[in-house]
Amino acid sequence: MGQQAVLGSYPVHFHRCGDVDRHGGYAQPAYVDSLAIHHSFSRCVVVHATNGLLVRDTVGYDTLGHCFFLEDGIEQRNVFFHNLGLVTRPGTILPTDRNDTMCTEIRDRVYKGHVPSPATECKAVSTFWIANPNNHLISNAAAGSQDAGIWYVFHSSSTGDSHGLVPETRAELTPLGIFYNNRIHSNFKAGLFIDKGVKTSNASAADPREYLCLDNSARFRPHENSDPAKPRVAALVDALISFKNNDLGAWIRGGDVIIQNSAFADNGVGLSFASDGSYPKDVGSSQEVADSLFVGESKNRGTNGGLNKYWGLGGVDGKLRTLPRNKTFPIRGFQIYDGPVRLLRSTFRAYAPTPERFTSAVGFNLKNTWQLTPRNNLSSLSFLSSVTLRAFFGRPGQWFEDNDLDGDKNSIFHDVDGSVSGYPGTYVARADNFLVRHPACVDVPQWNGCVCSGRYAQVYIKTQGTPNLGLSVTRDEYPERPMLLRGINSHGALSQQYQPVLMLTKSYTLHWSSQAPREVAISLVNFDLGDWAFLGLCYPSDTVFQVVSDIYDRQNNVFDGMEDYGSVSSLAELQKRPLDRKYFFDSSTGLLWLYVRAQHGRSGYSYCSVRGCERVKITATTSTKQTCNCTARAYPKYRKQPSATTPMPPPTTTPCTRCGASKLVFSSDPSSSYLQTQIKALSLVEEQNNDTRAFITVNAKQFNLTQVGFLVVAADACTGKVTKQSFFPKLDSKMKQHFTSGIPARSIVMLATRGQPDGFAKVAPHLVPLGAAKVADLQGRGSFAFFGFQGVATRPPWVSLLVGQGEEPVGMIERYIPLALEEYSCPLGAEPAKRKDLELLRKARR
């Protein structure tokens, strides 16, 4: 079903149906239930201008274009429950469906000769394409997409048939619906992607790109009633499992966003948040991940061949495995970018570099031109012994290139409790950043980093009037170690932006790579009330200055509180009056000295004060066109002795007992909806090879099989509680009776063998009542494991009898068995928090 050439030809298409739930007068919502859609030539289920639809238990396999698809950006309250999408390939209908070749060759809807950029206009095909955040995704799985598993995209206005016909929904400001227990893996670009919008205007000379191509202008900032004047509503991503994604396990831009109880494994980068280049667009917003697990290399090593391009040695066990991106790609668990972000109560496992690549638990965005705030906080983290590189700041070479862009140099985070570095209350920065160092800092060469005490903030410096301008920032205590910043704007731009991190209460000089700019605006970023830095800016000796301070309200684009700076006759006089709006120009060195000091306090995670962003604006008039670098005249005159403003704390000597995730994924926690089981049978061959382990594990509780015989364990299929464990040295009347009447109804039954007990080859017929599909021939087999069910005529799909080949062992078998399914006929009240997904489904339908 489905056609690429005919718009609207899809296997299932709810076309402009309006409200199909209680809002539309339906006692129960319209639904799509238990469909198998495969090899579709265009999408799977399309929800178009339809609200409140339930899509559940539906499979989309090997299809073209976005699979489960919300079309116009106005669709809300739709519920996607327990669906599976596999192998989502590119299509041709929308730019976001297309791959590189389609993107550049399909040009009938661009303006004149425009050649689309695949990376920025196309290449977004996703298994779930969610064009409005007010929809619910519960217990879905998305795997094998060309680009993303689940992509939340934001329409700035309604599009397609809906444009102008319905009230605008303001998708960027709309709170996120329920997102719970979704599993995403084996996607090329990302597992979960929350970012970007689509172009909502037709192609024109002003903007030649195609209508509905990918656009980078959207920023997710959810607020109550989609009103930015009302309180923020944090978007909650709960119980996400994202693994084996080639690039990113999850990429999320915007805030407030909270990720909890989630797991990221075997991804190129496990998780990366992003906000904006200079400031978060929504003042005071932030991002958090808590109670989560990050795994660099799991025991799921994958297979060589097929679409697995990269096959190489793991860093933890040295065994061959599939690799993301490239054999040399620097794998990172949590990637720090922009900010402010908080990472807390999380566990890292199996991050170990190899001679070919760097692999770190915590890392930074590669080749970063943008700002990084020192307010990025890490706390209560646990690093297992398999983590040999906790943090890494990069080195020049492949992937990092010169590692010298502005964001690379200013990489930093706050180690709140010392759970990363061992020094509580410190900051971890790049080792060669002498704007933040002091003599007592502790170097960590393996990280290319250092651990320092102190207080830190940023200055956002914006210049006007000089193209291609570089900035050199020097701390007076380390004049031989300046930081050279190139800025973030493109080559040839008359304006430029820089945002270095500074140690507060220190003095710095600023120098230019060509003539001094006509205008410099310095904004105080993350300064608390009373925080200050002392700055000297380089200018020609004939310069005349106008210096003013103001407060910029970014939300309303209003300037307020303007006040002129007056000049004083000496540096000594200026230093006696640090609270006054004064400046001093030392014509002998060419340095304009002034204090930048916060006059107002901040609130929460806002980069600026409660009044707005405090700024100092310098307008310079000069006839000199020469390069303006005053370093040679400034030093040694202004050189100071290096010192720490805050003493280094002693290292922690006791392990943190409250660090790490409070629970790991699929643990014995009662909120889990699955039973985690393992069966390890033992054959004679294994015993001869000194392997003595035979056991059954249920939710981390292990039942050992230490003698030749059969071990049978039963667990309640509704609650997950183990109800019975029995050992039988041979197949006798007691064991036969146990199978017929000794196992409680509604039981998950697990059986393991050790050696070749009497009756080994005759057990299979007694397993048929427990769901075994046929009488297996066990004669001559080394061992077997069995998962069965006692209680219903219908055989659950997870029931299986696993038999070793010949005398070869069956190995350890792991299964995650769903609890409290409807077909188990659980009694009322026997469906506790085990099926939180069903509770959330009922909530979503209400």
Image: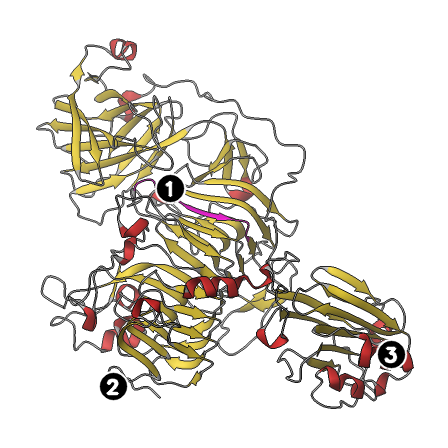
Which residue is nearer to you in this view: 342 or 178? 178
Magenta residues? 283-292
Name the disc covering residue 372, or none: 1
| 287 in the magenta segment | yes
- Of callouts 2 and 3, the N-terminal one: 2
| Residue at x-position 21% and y-position 49% | 491
Magenta stretch, main secondary structure class: loop
Left or right position of 552 against 682:
left
- Of callouts 3 and 1, the N-terminal one: 1
| Residue at x-position 27% and y-position 61% | 197
Name the disc covering residue 735, or none: 3
The local crowd at label 1, few if under 14, some if 14 to 19, many if 20 or more residues have their Cα within 10 Å, is many
Q: Amino acid at mark 2?
A: Ala
**Residue 516 visible here:** no
Left or right position of 61 against 499:
right
Residue ID for mark 2 = 5
Q: Could you tell me if the residues under marks 2 and 1 are in contact, i.e. CB atoms within 8 Å? A: no
User: Can you say whether 159 is above or below 196 in the image?
Assistant: below
Q: Could you tell me if the residues under marks 3 and 1 are in contact, i.e. CB atoms within 8 Å? A: no
| 345 in the magenta segment | no
Name the image quarter holding residue 549.
top left
Left or right position of 643 against 51:
right
Q: Position of residue 403 (x, y in %)?
A: 40, 47
Left or right position of 203 against 314:
left
